[in-house]
Image: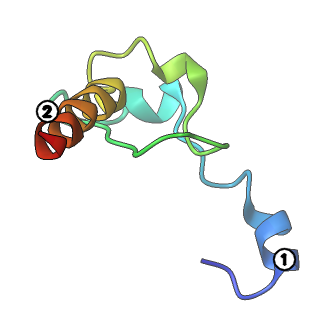
Amino acid sequence: RFFNEEDYLRLRDTYILTPEKMALASDKLRVLHPLPRVNEISVAVDGDPRACYFKQVLYGKYMRMALIL
């Protein structure tokens, strides 16, 4: 979190997960994100088998559906 908007605007594009950064990571890495993504994860990472955020969202949907029953 940022205390002021200036810091946010200055740093918002600094921390973005890219395929280049994924190439440096372990094969055991799993990337999770609650979505919707704004600028944190490049769409080029979506095809990486370690990108599990779409599964995470799907499983969360099933969990919420089960809790409603």
Could you tell which of marks 1 and 2 lies nearer the N-terminus? 1
Q: On the image, numbered disc 1 is attached to which residue?
A: 5
Identified at 42% across, 11% down, the residue is 47
Instruction: Name the mark nearer the viewer: 1 or 2.
Output: 1
* Number of residues whose C-alpha sits closer than 10 Å to that of mark 2, classed few (under 14), some (14–19) or many (20 or more): few
The x, y position of residue 6, in whole percent, is: 88, 77
Identified at 39% across, 26% down, the residue is 23
Secondary structure under the numbered disc 2 in the rendered image: loop
Q: Is residue 27 above or below residue 7?
A: above
Identified at 75% across, 64% down, the residue is 11
Identified at 84% across, 77% down, the residue is 5
Of residues 18 and 46, the one nearer the viewer is: 46
**Which quarter of the rendered picture does the C terminus lie within?**
top left
Check the image and name the residue furthest to the front. Answer: 69
* Number of residues whose C-alpha sits closer than 10 Å to that of mark 1, classed few (under 14), some (14–19) or many (20 or more): few
Of residues 2 and 13, the one nearer the viewer is: 2
The amino acid sitting under disc 2 is Lys
Number of numbered labels in the structure image: 2
Q: On the image, numbered disc 2 is attached to which residue?
A: 28
